[in-house]
Image: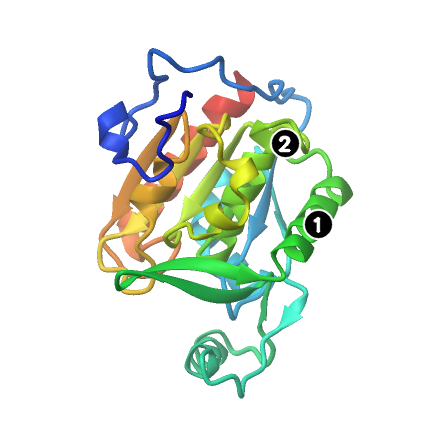
Amino acid sequence: MGDDWDPFADPADDALVGVVGIAPDSPKLASAPSVPKSRKIRVLCLHGTCSSNRILRMQIGSLIRAAEADFEFIFSEGTIKVDPSDPELAGMVELMQKAFNVTEVFQYAEPTIDDRAGVPFRTYQKLDECLAFVRDELKRHSPIDFVLGFSQGANIANLVAAQAGLGLIQPLCGVVHMCAHKPGWVDQKPELFMERIQVPALVIAGAKDAVSFGATEVAALYEQVVQLTHSSDHRPLPAGKEGVELAREIIDWMALRARG
């Protein structure tokens, strides 16, 4: 991409927002083989902080229903059990336990913050262990065509897509980010972000999200990206008709890239 490549440049400068296209000076996109019609399109799903595979399954229920018989969703679960006495996460643990009637919640890595002049960028402890776990999940559930992540899962999915774009792990047809944070993890793994990621991405944000604000920065990391915004808060899909319609858009986007 050249010495002036800026991973946090405004994606609008490169005509990346809301379109499907390749910038004129871009290298050829790395591509996964088309998914044969003889099998379902397989999606590895990564949940958020203080969550679980069961919770994410409920959160994206309208997406699963929209997929009908042509998709298979595989739900991974983080290996780190969240301590409800953790002062940073206690409120979120209580909220998730009450909202989803669960006793235990998990995460993939321990979240930290890189404060940049008052702007919080998300970073992680135990990031290498997290990425090794997800690589094992991809192998265990192979073939996987897409990675879909919400909140922390969306952040981890960005690192996974970067690895796939560089040929370090199996190729992906695409990645779906829902409510991603500002990507401080880029500075933790700069070797993965020397150029824009060669995997198509769908980046979704909530207009009233008061938790994560990183859609623009995450979108800027990709060569080929579509951005969508729903009217709700920090959740994968809004309720009601809007959520059903957005789920249909996501399915259509994945199907187009998977079937070729």
Label 1 and label 2: CA atoms lie apart by 26 Å
Q: Position of residue 227 (x, y in %)?
A: 31, 37
- Please rate how many residues cluster around mark 2, counting C-alpha atoms within 10 Å: few if below 14, some from 14 to 19, many from 20: some
Specify the quadrant that holds the N terminus. top left
Residue carrying label 1: 132
Looking at the image, is 57 positioned above or below residue 23? Answer: below
Q: Earlier in the sequence, mark 1 or mark 2?
A: 2
Q: Amino acid at mark 2?
A: Lys
Residue in view at x 67 percent, y 27 percent = 39
Residue in view at x 42 percent, y 82 percent = 91
In front here: 39 or 18?
18
Q: Is residue 69 visible?
A: no
Residue carrying label 2: 40
- Please rate how many residues cluster around mark 1, counting C-alpha atoms within 10 Å: few if below 14, some from 14 to 19, many from 20: few
In front here: 188 or 228?
188
Residue in view at x 47 percent, y 66 percent = 112
Among all residues in the image, which is located at the extreme front?
3
